Amino acid sequence: MLQDLIQKGLRLSQHAIFRKFVGKAGGVLARPAKLAILLTSAYDKLIDTNSTQSGFAQIKDVMQTFIRLVKAYANGSYRSVSNRSLLLGIGVLLYLVTPIDVIPDFIPVLGLLDDISLMAWFVNAFQKEITNFREWEMHRSPQPNMGVL
């Protein structure tokens, strides 16, 4: 099932709506207040989701790690990430928190499936960036918390 989600996410990553979010990602990254709101909104959406879908907990954990990565990038403590990964990841977060999607979130099950699929694709495509960041986090003390920027 996870492979199906990844393939669907790949297709969504090529959709015009998602490309619009990636286009906005640079502007969000350059504005700390907007970035803080986005990260908080995405985190809240991820922790409030009670899904029984296979692989969802893994995707959720990686996306929460990505949120921490963006916070570390924004505060200047972590810069070992490609701009492409940052912009695509922020595009995924924008897609996640914005009600305008390919399949609107208010449609039961299907509305969240496109969000989950896009996150699965991102997790699969950018696992190396996530792994590198987690290694960097392990060597820091104290562990970062998920408060706002």
Image (cartoon, helix red, strand yellow):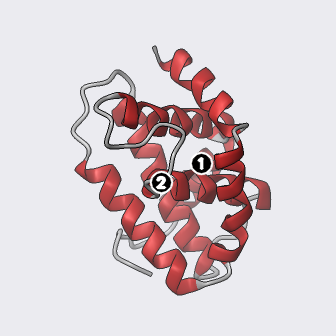
Residue linked to disc 1: 130
Q: Are marks 1 and 2 in contact (CB under 8 Å)?
A: yes
Residue at image coords 59%, 48%: 130
Q: Relative to 24, say whether 82 is above or below.
A: above
Which amino acid type is shown beneath numbered disc 2?
Answer: Thr
Q: Quadrant of residue 83?
A: bottom right
- In the picture provided, is 4 more to the left or to the right than 29? left
Which residue sits at x=43%, y=54%?
Answer: 99
Looking at this view, is 34 or 84 the one in front?
34
- Which residue is denoted by mark 2 in the rendering? 65
Horizontal and vertical percent position of residue 122: 61, 40
Q: Mark 1 belongs to which amino acid?
A: Ile
First in sequence: mark 1 vs mark 2 = 2
Q: Residues within 10 Å of mark 2 (few under 14, many from 20)?
A: some
Q: Label 2: state its secondary structure.
A: helix
Q: Secondary structure at mark 1?
A: helix
Q: CA distance from mark 1 to mark 2?
A: 7 Å
Please state if 76 lies on the left or on the right of 68 as rendered: right
Q: Residue at x 64, y 81 (%)?
A: 76
Nearest the camera: 68 or 21? 21
Residue 12, horizontal then vertical, whole percent: 63, 34
Give the quadrant of the C terminus.
bottom left
Is residue 143 at least partly visible in the picture? no
Classify residue 116 as left or right of residue 43. right
